[in-house]
Amino acid sequence: MLFEQIARNKRHTVYVMAAFVVLVALIGAAVGYVFFNSMMAGLVMAIVVAVVYSAIMIGQSTDVVMNLNHARELHSADDDPELWHIVEDMAMVAKVPMPRVFIIDDESPNAFATGNSPKHSAVAVTTGIQARLTREEMEGVIGHEMTHVRNYDIRLQTIALALTAAISLLVNWGLNSFWWGGGRRRDDDRDGNGSIQILLMLVSVILIVLAPLAASLVQMALSRNREYLADAGSVELTRNPKGLIDALNKIDDSQPMAQADPSSAALYISDPFKAKKTWTHLFETHPPMADRIARLEKM
């Protein structure tokens, strides 16, 4: 069951990322048609913008994320022996390099991992999670985070964020094109193809208007799917689903974090703001805790 769960989650991730790429291509083609009178020009522009944004965001330092979340770094096992050795042990089991270790002074139990590769990774935990969780439960949480590191999830989320930003830029160009005179078709379009031109223009405008919403939904779906995969990965590393189940129950039954950075919310093992749940779950960065626990109980 465990490995079937992992395989299914990986397939879902591929589908979501494929949808993201298709969405970028469609928006690029729509903007190109409206702005440049050329779908191919828009498609090339979309690819260039997406690649540039991804390169810039991947190159950002882990220190930026940690500073935004007010985290302080541990420099050796002497600073916090128990936490250091738990991270060290789980990194060894996951067969990844020892990450940098940070602590966030916050009473709410939570944790996250960041970094662009296993060689440049970092894990952060709150003082609240250290106070409330047993060692067994902490191993489940750190196993979850080491799975994110091992699977390059943070880089994947960074690319998703870059694609979302690229789509926003393309949409702004497309909407501004109407103010700059874009979208005005040539007079020679008033022939048999006029109705086709109008239809293409209408579809392009609809895509441009709905693109930001669609990008956000795809990004959140990717985040939710990677949480399921990291949960399964934690069980694979610890061979102890109960530890993570108990940890998630305690994390769920807690107050919101005081100073978490909103742009980092998807990185945490649980929503740091405890946002009100919606019946569709489409606008949530994390899957429902009850669903996560139910899947773990079946492993």
Image: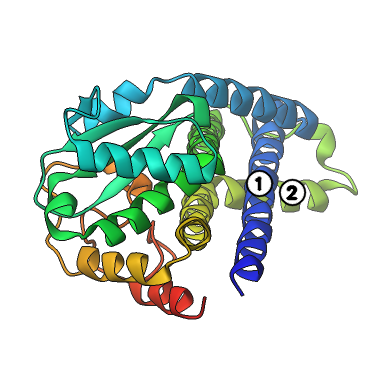
**Residue nearest the observer in this picture, 105 or 201:** 105
- Left or right? Give the position of 149 relative to 44: left
**Image location of residue 9, percent across then percent down:** 60, 62
189 shown above or below 169: below
Q: Which mark is residue 7?
A: none
Quarter of the image holding residue 137? bottom left
Residue 117 visible in image? no
Q: What's the CA distance linking mark 2 and mark 1? A: 6 Å
Look at mark 1 in the image and give the residue it sits on: 204
- Left or right? Give the position of 250 relative to 136: left
- Left or right? Give the position of 39 relative to 156: right
**Residue nearest the observer in this picture, 31 or 265:** 265
**Count the marks: how many?**
2
Element under label 2? Answer: helix
**Image location of residue 176, percent across then percent down:** 50, 30
Question: Given the current orientation, which residue lies at the most extreme right position?
Answer: 192
**Image location of residue 265, percent across then percent down:** 31, 47
Q: Residue at 13% x, 41% y: name it.
A: 259
**The N terminus, quarter of image:** bottom right
Look at mark 2 in the image and give the residue it sits on: 200
Mark 2, other Cα within 10 Å: few <14 / some 14–19 / many ≥20 = some
75 shown above or below 81: above
Q: How is the image coloured?
A: rainbow
Callout 1, which amino acid?
Ser
**Residue nearest the observer in this picture, 95 or 209:** 95
- Left or right? Give the position of 175 relative to 248: right
Callout 2, which amino acid?
Leu
